[in-house]
Image (cartoon, helix red, strand yellow):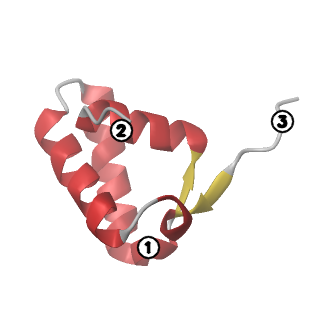
């Protein structure tokens, strides 16, 4: 059985401006089908829930990887 997922509201991980930039950059950089589907889903959830969407540590990793953001 897997351990608990570290999922927190986007507002605890990013500012609104930062998240919007990540989503925009990721949309431009997504080349693989999986990446495009992932970003489309993240954008849809953001449009529905705004900064209240929950983002897991793994989702954060993928979003930043696709957006090519180096932390």
Q: Residues within 10 Å of mark 2 (few under 14, many from 20)?
A: some
Q: Is residue 5 above or below residue 65?
A: below
**In whole angstroms, how far apart are the C-alphas of marks 2 and 1?**
17 Å
Q: Residue furthest front?
A: 71
Horizontal and vertical percent position of residue 29 = 15, 34
Q: Position of residue 25 (x, y in %)?
A: 17, 45
Q: Which residue is mark 1?
A: 51
The label on residue 64 is: 2
Q: Residue at x 49, y 64 (%)?
A: 10
Please state, as top left, top right, bottom left or bottom right, where the C terminus lies in the image: top left
Judge by depth and name the residue closer to the eye, 41 or 53.
53
Judged left or right of residue 47, residue 60 is: right
Residue positioned 32% across, 32% down in the render: 70
Residue displayed at 27% across by 68% down: 17
Mark closest to the chain's N terminus, 2 or 1: 1
Numbered badge on residue 9:
none
Labels 2 and 1 touching (C-beta < 8 A): no
Question: Pointer 3: what residue?
Answer: 3
- The tag earlier along the polypeptide, 3 or 2, is 3
Tell me if 54 is positioned left or right of 7 in this view.
left
Regarding mark 2 in the picture, which secondary structure is present there? helix
Q: Does label 3 or label 1 sit earlier along the sequence?
A: 3
Q: Which one is closest to the eye, mark 3 or mark 2?
A: 2
What separation in Å lies between label 3 and label 1 (alpha carbons)? 25 Å
Looking at the rendered image, the quarter that the N terminus falls into is: top right
Residue at figure coordinates x 30%, y 60% from the top left: 18
Give the SS element for disc 1: helix
* Percent of width and height locating residue 61: 47, 35
């Amino acid at each position: 059985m897997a351990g608990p997922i570290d999922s927190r509201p986007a507002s605890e991980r990013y500012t609104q401006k930062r998240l919007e930039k990540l989503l925009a950059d990721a949309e431009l950089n997504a080349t693989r089908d999986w990446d495009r589907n992932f970003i489309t889903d993240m954008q849809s959830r953001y449009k529905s829930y705004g900064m209240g969407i929950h983002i897991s540590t793994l989702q954060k990793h993928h979003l930043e990887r696709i957006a090519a953001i180096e932390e």
